[in-house]
Image (cartoon, rainbow, N blue to C red):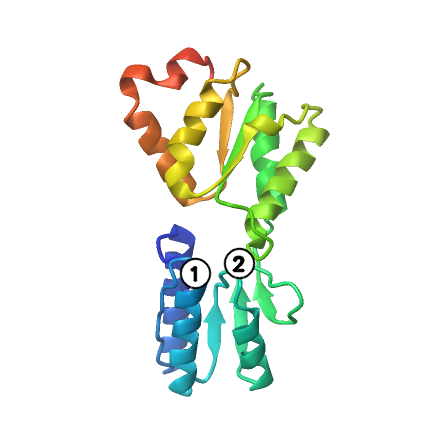
Amino acid sequence: MANIRHAFSTEMIRIIENALEAQDIYVIICNADDNPQKEEHHIRALLSRKVDGLIIFPTETNATIYRQILKEEIPVVFIDRIVDGLSVDTILLDNQMAASLAVSTLAASGHNKIAMLTLPTRSAISPRIERIEGYKTALTACKIPFNPDYIYSDELHTLPAGLTKIFQLADRPNALIAGNDLILREILHFFKSSKTNNPLRRSGNWH
């Protein structure tokens, strides 16, 4: 599990566990906290226990251990993320479509200054890249000019500073898209903790 803090990950664990337990298959859950070293440690520990298969939310830099799994012909399924150069059965969301729907819905409500906030975009974490691509494509389709200042992509703890910077722009956005549930939680916390100087109070109509 790349990071158990994600609501998506927690829900997927529940579904997987229920489905496998119905077939008398014992489930071992490991949380990597988006840490490749921790993920590799868990995978090697599971391999040493001769598990029958692995369901992995990949982190980012463990292609070597993934190749070892494939070489040993251990059944494996990836969830949510594609790893370049590996042919692995993968369950994916349509991240580009999700971001596109978010933009088009906001645009239909009259918002034309839409910011997108995500965690760091790295090549191995494909959903974040796909969401930004969907965001940009939808802006073009909605005839909204792309403003690079409206994209913020960095570690979660930097988000308050990033939001402050966005709201200090001369031409502030009037809508935000959160790249995932952790980003949304931080955005809500930012506004709650900024009641006395809340950017929303100065920016008109918001979503």
Asked if residue 92 lies left or right of residue 138, the reply is left
Q: In the picture, which quadrant includes the N terminus?
A: bottom left
Residue at point 60% right, 63% down? 83
The residue that disc 1 covers is: 2
Of residue 166 and residue 115, the one placed in the foreground of this image is 166
Q: Position of residue 99 (x, y in %)?
A: 58, 40
Residue at point 60% right, 47% down? 129
Residue at point 39% right, 18% down? 199
Which image quadrant for residue 72? Answer: bottom right
Residue at point 47% right, 16% down? 205
Identify the mark nearer the N-term, 1 or 2. 1
Asked if residue 169 lies left or right of residue 112, the reply is left
Kindly state the secondary structure of the residue where label 1 is placed: loop
Kindly state the secondary structure of the residue where label 2 is placed: loop
Label 2 amino acid?
Answer: Asp
Asked if residue 4 lies left or right of residue 90, the reply is left
| Distance between mark 1 and mark 2 Cα atoms | 10 Å
How packed mark 2 is, by other alpha carbons closer than 10 Å (few <14, some 14-19, many 20 or more), is some
Q: Which mark is residue 80?
A: 2
